[in-house]
């Protein structure tokens, strides 16, 4: 599948997650590495925009939502054979908690060396325990600003 073809397929599959209850928009952008990169290939960036209701949840509840949605995205990427086409994956969840615009609420990234190969039995713990995975959440900082 050509790069443009698999990106179209990826966007179509991501739209299945958009339900306007939790996620109101989702985009995916494969970014090619420069020719001299130590990590050649496409690096996939997925951005999901949470609805206002979800974005304003308590921080611990928001992280649980993000982890659940992350798991659904990774499972879909594996099942559609799209994850294997990339060198790294970065998934960000954005939302408006302060009425000043969308902030990044949660982010997960992982390199292809740690990609799961099968979605059956995949858990969030497996994703978080990957050797080169990074999870970050800004909801605690944002909550402090709101207090």
Image: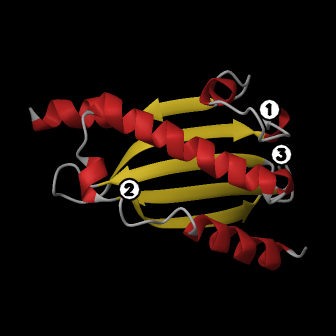
Task: Report helix, strand or loop for mark 1.
Answer: helix
Horizontal side of 105 relative to 71 (left or right) equals: left
Residue 39 is labelled as 3
Outermost residue, left direction?
A: 147
Residue at the spot of label 1: 114
Q: Give the x, y percent position of residue 35.
A: 86, 59
Q: Position of residue 81 (x, y in %)?
A: 84, 57
Q: Earlier in the sequence, mark 2 or mark 3?
A: 2
In this picture, residue 76 sits left or right of residue 93: right
Q: Residues within 10 Å of mark 2 (few under 14, many from 20)?
A: some
Check contact, mark 1 vs mark 2: CB within 8 A: no
Residue located at (20% from left, 34% from top): 143
**Precedes in sequence: disc 1 or disc 3:** 3
Asked whether 96 or 70 is in front, the reply is 70
Q: Residues within 10 Å of mark 3 (few under 14, many from 20)?
A: some
Residue for badge 2: 22
Question: Real-space Cα distance between discs 1 and 2?
Answer: 28 Å
Instruction: Identify which residue, 19 or 98, lies in the foreground.
Output: 19
């Amino acid at each position: 599948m050509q790069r443009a073809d698999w990106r179209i397929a990826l966007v179509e599959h991501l739209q299945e997650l958009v339900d306007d209850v939790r996620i109101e928009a989702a985009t995916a952008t494969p970014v090619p590495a420069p020719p001299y990169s130590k990590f050649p290939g496409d690096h996939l960036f997925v951005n999901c925009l949470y609805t206002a209701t979800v974005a304003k949840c308590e921080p611990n509840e928001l992280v649980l939502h993000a982890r659940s949605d992350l798991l659904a995205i990774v499972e879909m990427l594996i099942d559609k054979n799209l994850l294997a086409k990339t060198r790294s994956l970065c998934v960000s969840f954005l939302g408006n908690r302060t009425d000043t615009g969308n902030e990044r609420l949660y982010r997960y990234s992982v390199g292809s060396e740690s990609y799961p190969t099968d979605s059956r039995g995949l858990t969030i713990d497996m994703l978080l325990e990957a050797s080169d995975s990074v999870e970050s959440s800004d909801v605690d900082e944002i909550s402090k600003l709101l207090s």
